[in-house]
Image (tube, grey):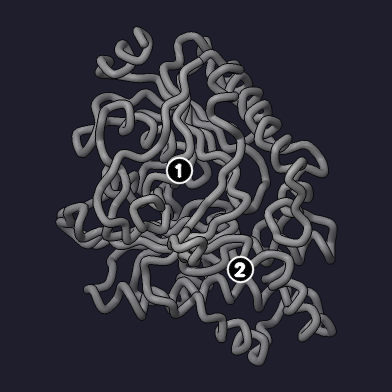
Amino acid sequence: MKQLVELFEKKSRLVIGLMSGTSVDGIDAAIAEIEGSGTGMKMRQIDFITVPFPEGFKELVIRNSLTGTSDVADIARLNFLIAQLYADAVRRLCNHAGVKTQDVDLIGSHGQTIHHLPRAERMFGKDVSATLQIGDPSVLAKLTGIATVGDFRVGDIALGGQGAPLVPYFDYILFRSNEKSRSLLNIGGISNITYLPKGCGTQDVLAFDTGPGNMIVDRLMKKMFNKDFDEGGAIAIAGTIQGDMIDWLMTDTFVRMAPPKSTGRERYGDPFVTSLLEKYGGRRIEDIIATVSEFTAVSVYTNYLLFLKTKGGIDELFVSGGGAHNRYILDSLRNHFGGVSVAAAEDIGVSSDAKEALCFAVLANELVSGNPANLPSVTGASKETLIGKICLP
């Protein structure tokens, strides 16, 4: 307990953030010096790396993320294996940054989501929502010797929230403005957007998942080209949008569902891709990739029109995640958003690749500082609450 008390009393902490998203591309690992907490917090990024997962790992995770193909023994072992891979990433990051692991105060680990069920179903007289991120933080703490915070989503869901998205708190702390209304869009496997009206307080922040990010494109690229993603959007750029296909895609009810809302592989995973190919698999693959990439951009813009423009709109849109490197998607967003400035997150002072990992470093720091870090206006939770659980080495 002495270590925990010392951690609480520190004014400045060296914190590592770890993130592996629904794309299951690899582990994003960032290290930052964080001084203070809350709206007075100052953060300085020290280093960032991405550590690829072993060959075949992505397919194993995806198989165990879906009903019908998952296996409880695989999930139990993956829970420990992912923590081991995260521990390796911590050591590689420290080596790359020239930092001793014993000098790191804290790890914030998102874990790997394998199932997310924010909509309650009735079970034995109780309304039950659920989420499961594996890569147990207790295992990670024991393997690294560093206090670790994980399981950030659970506390919010326990209070009736979606448990996601969590990045908006980070966005509010670091990027709110008194002069301009901003949105921050992260395009990972799923796309999520944060709305920060100028001069906003926490109660004014809105954020939600808009629909697919790279998930559908990535699965099609794997099936058709044995590649993990459409690098730079090159395949999409070579294709032509299919009008009937985009119309069919836009019948997806999640896109127009009112917030709070969150989603994942349960909606846009292999069954979705299978249905798409059954209906349109005879088209040129370049045209399919172009149309699905357009679906990502159009679903973002549709959500903006329905739920954010009515609140006053935005002056600036900053894009992070893997989608920030896809020229097709960025050009499509610029076309749809017209007079709104659309730029990569680097233009606002943060790495578009490191942003989510840094977020979990900040969320870990907020927990040990005693600050609630969910936003009920975003998740729909009944109240603000501390999120995450602290695991000691």
Mark 1: few, some, or many residues within 10 Å (few <14, many ≥20)?
many
Q: Residue at x 44, y 46 (%)?
A: 154
Q: Residue at x 44, y 30 (%)?
A: 149
What element does badge 2 sit on?
A: helix
What element does badge 1 sit on?
A: helix
Which residue of the protein is positioned furthest toward the front in this rendering?
Answer: 124
- Evaluate if marks 1 and 2 touch, with contact meaning CB atoms under 8 Å apart: no
Of 276 and 93, the residue lying toward us: 276
Q: Is residue 16 left or right of residue 221?
A: left
Residue kind at label 1, given as amino acid type: Lys
Of 360 and 329, the residue lying toward us: 360
Closer to the camera: disc 1 or disc 2?
2
> Would you say residue 191 is visible in this rendering?
no
Which numbered dot is residue 355?
Answer: 1
Q: Which residue is mark 2?
A: 267
Please say if 389 is above or below 230. Answer: above
